[in-house]
Image (cartoon, grey):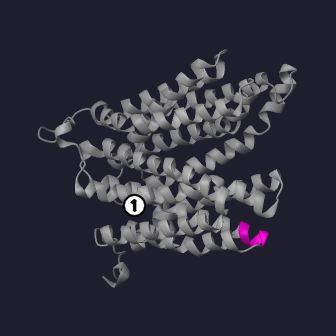
């Protein structure tokens, strides 16, 4: 209870910039939850086929992958606020083009711009949070950012589900028509535009005392050092394991248990809620054990539930294991980002944040291709074993590389965690 009280105090004591950032994240995630729920349906309702939709989605992912590093370098040159503003405006412009274009080829251009904007925005966010919170506040801020994003995305999906029917009635069109979906997407884009207001209100420090100014990034000090590579490798391994299985869990449930779409949707919605809530509790564990030990413990604790999901042929057990696996595996993710930002120099944070995103994208890009072949030839059991093995390896790697890199802060009147 005392630890929970301290977390509330830290959240309340966050800087004005940090609170504005969280407000912006919440509003943006609400609109994004609606947008992502209906984007695919809108594209198909336009008359495009699944092949074009796949090309569109690949264009977004590949542009974010290839442009991620240049965008990270740009973040360290522009500053955090300007980079986030530029990324948000670029992404919003791209989504409007996606929604309003009457022909197909601008949609592909918009997909590339959307990926670039997201890469710029995502590279700036971790660096901004690291620089607008103290060392004790960072786990709280990073966890709030992730947890609020999940919870507001869920809320957007829940609220947005009724919007096509509403616009169908108002505009006297079919709820699954292009017009109804377009009106829904425009509503989501309006919410995302509203998120620019708190972002604009952020006051970024413009000047520093002589000798402390941020040194411009140059290729001569490109941060591909041993310590940075050590941050990238576990993220790459985790992403590879996730890419093998996680995108296909909906297919696994449908094939293994023959459940309805409504039960499937409810199962995944509850999972998102639990992940969002658990993420907000991660700083309490980090305060006691330290960031790395918390990450390793929660990831290892998720492995029995991963195996139960894959090999216990009882639906209630599988659903419970699915919820617990997702909650434990994802709750400490923001702690790793906070830890990574603390390990590098300030003028490298945007670039290193982009490199971590690229490592994850590479793993996520390789895994699904391998998974498709394995599913066709052997089914899902080898994928559960392979994903579990990669999670185990990545967790042990984190412990070996960084287990002694931090000491959890001792609470007043208590011994240090772990007996140290």
Q: Quadrant of the C terminus?
A: bottom left
Q: Is residue 343 left or right of residue 241?
A: left
Residue holding disc 1: 234
The residue that appears at 74% across and 41% down in the rendered structure is: 159
Rendered view: 268 above or below 415:
above
The image quarter in which residue 87 lies: top left
- Asked whether 402 or 373 is in front, the reply is 373
As for residue 32 lying within the magenta part, the answer is: no
The prevailing secondary structure element of the residues shown in magenta is: helix
Q: Position of residue 145 (x, y in %)?
A: 50, 49
The residue that appears at 28% across and 54% down in the rendered structure is: 228
The image quarter in which residue 140 lies: bottom left
Q: Position of residue 220 (x, y in %)?
A: 16, 39
Q: Position of residue 167 (x, y in %)?
A: 81, 26
- Asked whether 115 or 103 is in front, the reply is 103
As for residue 317 lying within the magenta part, the answer is: yes
Find the residue positioned furthest to the left.
211
The secondary element bearing badge 1 is classed as helix
Find the residue positioned furthest to the front.
377
Question: Magenta part of the protein: which range?
Answer: 314-319
Q: Is residue 77 left or right of residue 392?
A: left
């Amino acid at each position: 209870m005392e630890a929970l009280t301290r977390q509330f105090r830290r959240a309340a004591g966050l800087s004005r910039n940090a609170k504005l950032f969280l407000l912006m994240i919440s509003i943006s995630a609400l609109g994004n939850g609606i947008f992502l729920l209906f984007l695919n349906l809108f594209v198909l309702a336009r008359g495009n086929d699944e092949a074009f939709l796949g090309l569109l989605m690949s264009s977004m992912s590949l542009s974010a992958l290839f442009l991620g590093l240049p965008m990270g370098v740009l973040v360290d040159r522009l500053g955090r606020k300007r980079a986030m503003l530029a990324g948000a405006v670029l992404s919003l412009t791209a989504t409007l083009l996606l929604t309003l274009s009457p022909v197909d080829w601008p949609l592909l251009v918009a997909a590339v711009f959307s990926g670039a904007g997201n890469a710029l925005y995502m590279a700036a966010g971790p660096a901004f949070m690291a620089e607008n919170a103290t060392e004790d506040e960072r786990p709280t801020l990073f966890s709030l950012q992730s947890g609020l994003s999940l919870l507001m995305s869920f809320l957007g999906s829940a609220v947005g589900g009724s919007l096509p029917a509403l616009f169908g009635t108002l505009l006297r069109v079919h709820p699954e028509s292009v017009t109804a979906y377009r009106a829904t997407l425009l509503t989501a884009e309006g919410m995302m535009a509203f998120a620019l207001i708190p972002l604009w209100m952020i006051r970024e420090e413009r000047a520093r005392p002589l000798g402390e100014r941020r040194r411009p990034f140059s290729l001569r000090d490109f941060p591909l050092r041993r310590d940075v590579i050590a941050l990238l490798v576990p993220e790459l391994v985790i992403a590879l394991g996730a890419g093998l299985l996680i995108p296909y869990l909906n297919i696994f449930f449908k094939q293994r248990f023959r459940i309805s779409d409504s039960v499937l949707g409810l199962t995944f919605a509850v999972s998102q809620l639990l992940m969002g809530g658990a993420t907000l509790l991660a700083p309490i564990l980090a305060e006691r054990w330290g960031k790395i030990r918390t990450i390793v413990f929660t990831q290892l604790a998720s492995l029995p539930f991963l195996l139960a999901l894959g090999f216990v042929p009882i639906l209630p057990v599988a659903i419970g294991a699915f919820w617990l696996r997702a909650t434990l595996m994802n709750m400490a993710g923001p702690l790793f980002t906070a830890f990574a930002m603390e390990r590098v120099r300030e003028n490298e944070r945007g670039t290193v944040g982009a490199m971590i995103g690229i490592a994850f994208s590479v793993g996520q890009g390789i895994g699904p291709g391998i998974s498709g072949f394995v599913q066709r030839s052997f089914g899902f059991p080898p994928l559960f074993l392979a994903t579990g093995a990669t999670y185990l390896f990545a967790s042990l790697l984190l412990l070996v590389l960084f287990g002694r890199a931090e000491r959890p802060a001792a609470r007043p009147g208590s011994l240090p965690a772990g007996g140290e």
